[in-house]
Amino acid sequence: MDTEVTHQNPSIVVMGVAGSGKTTVAALLAGRLGASFAEGDEFHPPANVAKMTAGVPLDDADRWPWLGTIRDWLSAQHDAGRVGVVPASSLKRAYRDVLREARGGVLFVHLTGSRELLTERIQGRAGHFMKPAMLESQLATLQPLGDDEAGFTVDVAPRPAQIVDEIVERLAARGIRPAGAAASRTTEER
C-alpha cells in the first residue's frame, strides 16, 4: 500500500506497536530530512504515564487528549514552515483520523515486525514504562493502515539506518523531499 498524500511536505507519523523502534527510527528520519522531531510519549499527561507504568493499558478516553496534543504540535510545525516527525503508536484508524486533522497533511510510516522480535526488543529496554505483557493488548488493538490512508509499511528487522534509508527512498519516490533533506544515505549509523 502506497496511498498518496495531497501535500508536498506532509508531517510524518512513525507508527507501530511497542518494540517496533518508532522513536529511534523517527529521530533518525527527522535528522536525515532536516525536520522537527518530538517524542510522542512526551505528550502523554502524567496520569497516562502512571497507568502505563503500572502495566494498565490506556483506553480511548486516555488517548484522545494525547492525540490532540500531537496533532496540534504537527500543525504548529506546518505553520512555522517545518516538517514534523513524531513517533506515536496510532494503532486504530480513529486515532490516525485525529492526527490526520493536522494542517499540512500527514503520512504514516507503519513499522512492523514479528511478535518474537518485538517481545525481545521490549524485554531489552531498561526504564521504559511499556511492559512486555502490554504488547498483546497493542497487537489486538492494531488496525493496519487502510488502502485509503496515506502511508506505507516498513519491516523493522533491518538496522535502524537501513530502515531510514528505505523510508527516505519511498518518500522521494512520492516526490516528498522536505527542505534540508540529505540526498545521501546515512553513514554514521551503519
Image (cartoon, helix red, strand yellow):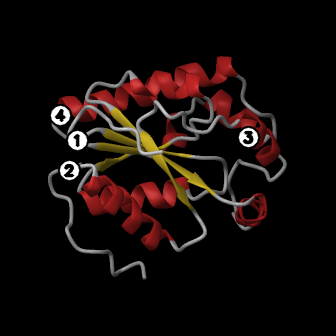
- Nearer the observer, disc 2 or disc 4? 2
164 over 48 or under it: above or below: below
Question: Where is residue 39 shown, x and y percent of the image?
Answer: 46, 46
Question: Where is residue 114 shown, x and y percent of the image?
Answer: 72, 60
Q: Which residue is mark 4?
A: 80
Q: Which residue is mark 3?
A: 138
* Residue pictured at 50% horizontal, 41% vertical: 40
Q: Are marks 2 and 1 in contact (CB under 8 Å)?
A: yes
> Which mark is on residue 129?
none
Q: Secondary structure at mark 4?
A: loop
* Residue pictured at 70% horizontal, 48% vertical: 129
Give, as a three-letter code, the residue at label 4. Ala
Residue 112 found in image quarter: bottom right
Q: Are marks 1 and 3 in contact (CB under 8 Å)?
A: no
> Which mark is on residue 178?
2
- Crowdedness near tag 4: few (<14), some (14–19) or many (≥20) residues, C-alpha within 10 Å: few
